[in-house]
Image: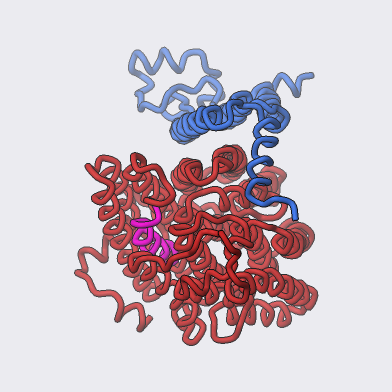
Chain colours: A blue, B red
Amino acid sequence: MSWIASHFNYVVVVVLMMAGLFIVFSSGNLIKRMIGLAMFQTSTGLFYITLSKVSGGTAAITLKADSETGRALAAPLDLAYIEQFGVDGVVYSNPLPHVLILTAIVVGVATLAVGLAIAVRIREAYGTVEADEIDALSRVTAEQAEPAP
Amino acid sequence: VIVLETLYVATPVLTAQAPILAIVIPLLGACAAAMAPSARTAWMISVAASLFGAWMALAVAGEAMREGVLVYVLGGFDPPMGIALRIDAMGALMGLLIGGVGTLAAVFSGHSLVAEVHAEKHTLFQAGFLLVQAGLVGLVFTGDAFNAFVFLEVSSIGTYALVAVGEKRDRRALPAAFNYLIMGTVGATFYVIGVGFLYAATGTLNMVDMAARLATLDQSMAVQAGFAFVIAGLGVKAAMFPLHGWLPGAYAGGPSLISVLLAATATKAAIYLMVRFMFEVFPQGTAFGEAFLTWVLAPLAAAGAIVCSVQAVFARELRRMIAFSSVAQVGFIFLGVSLANADGISASLFYMVAHGLMKATMFMALGALALSIGARRLDDFAGVAREAPWTAVAFAVGAASLVGTPLTMGFLAKWGLIEAAIASGQVWIAAVIAAGSVLTVIYVGRMIEAMFFRAPSPGAPRAKEAPIGVLAPLLVLAGLSIWFGLDASLPEQLSQAGAARLFEVRP
């Protein structure tokens, strides 16, 4: 139980990831598959952010510990912790994964946009967004292209 | 090296900036093409930007051969903190392949798009085409693991859209593109998860730095999980059997131009990155790595080489046949990689170039035929050699290279692969390659028989010889397969130097 509590974010990441993947591969509706895909991508965002978060850590903006804001931010921290890890008594979260995930979110949005645009075109060309109906219609096209010998 | 230097002449200033220009110029070209007033202007921008990219790739290749490795620091932050482009012979070889095929495909696109894509989409299509090229070149040039993901997605998102545009000819391009998008994005996300694990274990994203730190770490679960995610993710992009489900539809459905570019470069760039992770980033000789190569990579590659060759034999649509053949050839390439020594990797790199050139030739020849006959089935191509002899001959050269006929590049490639397998004592791999080649002969035989020795079916649309704008790049591609079959020094030097670098002792 305590393991789950201490790894709560990772548990959520795995649950989101699996739920997203499951939707992608089990759903026949193209829109639902895109939703699953977005969930799956979002879970990696949470994963990276969790990696970079230092408990009590603040944004990576250099602060002097003796400045007012610096003291305010450092106050809730355990003193021993500051001694061990703190820079000037202020603890920072790792900013790099945040930046990476910002990029990954942009990539995710672009993918989502292209995917939905294709879904719209599929709907125009086939009149449906259900994968099995599209397959059936595609098979008709294939047979027109190559009548059985 | 001599060949490279005679081919390449430029000012030193340009040479110093070549790595970034090879990426940025196609990227800017994409913006310009999107805003171009007419399809013709967009086409000219596309050709110019691709040509410039290829020229810069040539400069990079020359420098990389001279210096061993070329590091270009971006944004004034030194690596490992900042992002750097890092190009060795292996990356240079891939850059040349992408630049070269990209340029020829750009020339070819002038006529091909008119036949296969709605007129109002031509400018945007050229923009997407340049984006894909910029992404691929960035992917093979970058030295940063996360940067590689961004470039991977720049090129992939472009290809999803471009495959979907093939709907004018065949509406099945749309579900194929959607499927490709789903699979490709899942693959890319797996890659990101893997890089996340490796970052958590090492605290760096620079590949060289990551390699140095991984070498000193114990093989923790996090590292192994990261490796598995990275390889599985890239495996989707590389169409590694059994993750290749997206490929036949995408190659068969997309416009010919996109099949040319995808078949020649996209899967190859992903394989390149996999090789980089397997042998450069991840420490060599660990029990986990060895087990992966012996029990996962090699059997899957062998299965892919055989199963997909059989599928190609029984396919009825010509483009689908060539697409299945591509998956089978990816299997051959991975068989070489699984040998895990310099000979094997070198042979695989050489095979990648050979396969890129031959498949580009075959898809481009089909694109040239599609200008006059919108055919899909093999039977529709009956007797086209009589009406379009040059196109058919170019196709036949590509096909001969695919089979591995002597005097073509494909022969040297297969020979190198079999030689490396036997030298490593893996005779079964040589046997699988031989068996796969026999199957290749069967399906290539069916294509050639239909095109050259069968009479055209009565009432079928007559093929016409393609215009010179299409024939020229096609014949250049076919010529390259033969040229490198006679004198392979350029790709051979680069692939050997690239493979050797992976296995040299590192401090």
- Residue A84 visible in the displayed image: no
The residue located at (31%, 54%) in the rendering is B46
Q: Main secondary structure of the magenta part?
A: helix
Q: In this view, does B428 lie above or below B254?
A: below
Residue A55 sits in which quadrant?
Answer: top right
| Pick the front one: B151 or B404 | B404
Please provide percent x and percent y for residue B308: 72, 60
Residue B187 sits in which quadrant?
Answer: top right
Q: Does the magenta stretch include residue B112?
A: yes
Please provide percent x and percent y for residue B192: 56, 40
The residue located at (55%, 39%) in the rendering is B174
Q: In this view, does B238 lie above or below B499?
A: above
User: In which quadrant will I find the C terminus of chain B?
Assistant: bottom right
The residue located at (28%, 46%) in the rendering is B33
- Residue B454 visible in the displayed image: yes
| Pick the front one: A110 or B170 | B170
Q: Is residue B96 left or right of residue B303?
A: left
Query: Which segment did they paint magenta?
Result: B95-113
Q: In this view, does B248 lie above or below A96?
A: below
Residue B50 sits in which quadrant?
Answer: bottom left
Q: In this view, does A65 lie to the left or right of B226?
A: left
Q: Does the magenta stretch include residue A95?
A: no
Please provide percent x and percent y for residue B299: 78, 61
